[in-house]
Image (cartoon, rainbow, N blue to C red):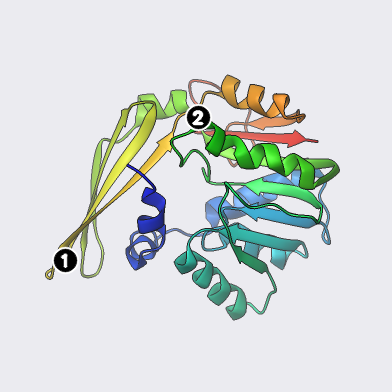
Amino acid sequence: MGEWFKDWFDSEDYLDVYRHRDDKDAEELVNLIIKHTGLKPGSFLLDAGCGAGRHSILFSERGFNVTGFDLSTTLLNKAKEEAAKKNIGINLLRADFRTITFKKKFDAVLNLFTSFGYFEDDDDNFHFVKEAHSFLKENGLYVFDYMNIAHLKKNIVCQSEKNLSDKKVKEIRNISGGRVNKEIIITSDECEVRYCESVKLYSKEVIENKFLSYGYRIKNLFGNYSGEEFDIENSPRLIIIFSK
């Protein structure tokens, strides 16, 4: 599927399709992170793959110093717009997971809402994880929020449809080639447009072993944004807090 994320995340259609999202999940996750990390206002956070800035804005509102990066100009512009509405300051950068690096040190790196596994190559997917160890402060944290693939395989919705104000959206999902794939078909009176998403599937064991090999330690493990214990069969999320 190539670099599908460049077309999809940079399209205005992406914002239209997901404009129904509220901040409930984001708020829950931010609360979970603050509760279980001990991070205090004034801490320096890096929101990796920040998208339209939902988590960055919530942390900034609570007094954290937030830097966010994303490859999508469209989503970064949306993040800037939302931050300006709330009169808060976030340092937003356009950058690629495979090449970005920092000289400054952060108290925590946030890798949230499955902003991971987009690339074909394992080394590309884990490159940032490995590099981030060098720009975390001593005992700094890496918060990793990903899907639980065992739960996904049992509960995948193969097809869904919804109507926007002037468009019809069909989403077709499948698991093949070690990836979860989604085709998004958007139909209006004028035309039909197709996009795709494709995320590589990694087990909990593979992820933990990779992080450990880069020098991280496991601090906490949760199965959803409410902070419930991880259950391999029933937890929708795999949320791991690693420390340096």
Q: Residue 148 carries which label?
A: 2
Q: Position of residue 211 (x, y in %)?
A: 68, 29
Q: Which of marks 1 and 2 is nearer the N terminus?
A: 2
Question: 224 or 94: which is nearer to us?
Answer: 94
User: Mark 1 is on which residue type?
Assistant: Ser
Question: 47 or 162: which is nearer to us?
Answer: 47
| SS category of the residue bearing label 1 | loop
Question: 90 or 118: which is nearer to us?
Answer: 118
Q: Which residue is drawn at 72% across and 31% down?
A: 220
Residue 70 appears in the figure? yes
Q: Which mark is residue 188?
A: 1
Q: Residue at x 63, y 42 (%)?
A: 128
Residue 224 appears in the figure? no
Within the image, what quadrant is residue 166 found in? bottom left
User: Mark 2 is on which residue type?
Assistant: Asn
Against 35, residue 166 (above or below) is below
In the rendered structure, the answer to whether residue 149 lies left or right of residue 205 reads left
Q: Which residue is drawn at 58% across and 48% down?
A: 97
Q: Where is residue 207 in the image (x, y as percent from the top left)?
A: 60, 27
Within the image, what quadrant is residue 209 found in? top right
Against 165, residue 71 (above or below) is above
Q: In which quarter of the image is the C terminus?
A: top right
Q: How many marks?
A: 2
Against 18, residue 37 (above or below) is above
Q: Where is residue 179 in the image (x, y as percent from the top left)?
A: 38, 31
Q: Position of residue 152 (x, y in %)?
A: 41, 30
| SS category of the residue bearing label 2 | loop
Q: Residue at x 61, y 57 (%)?
A: 55
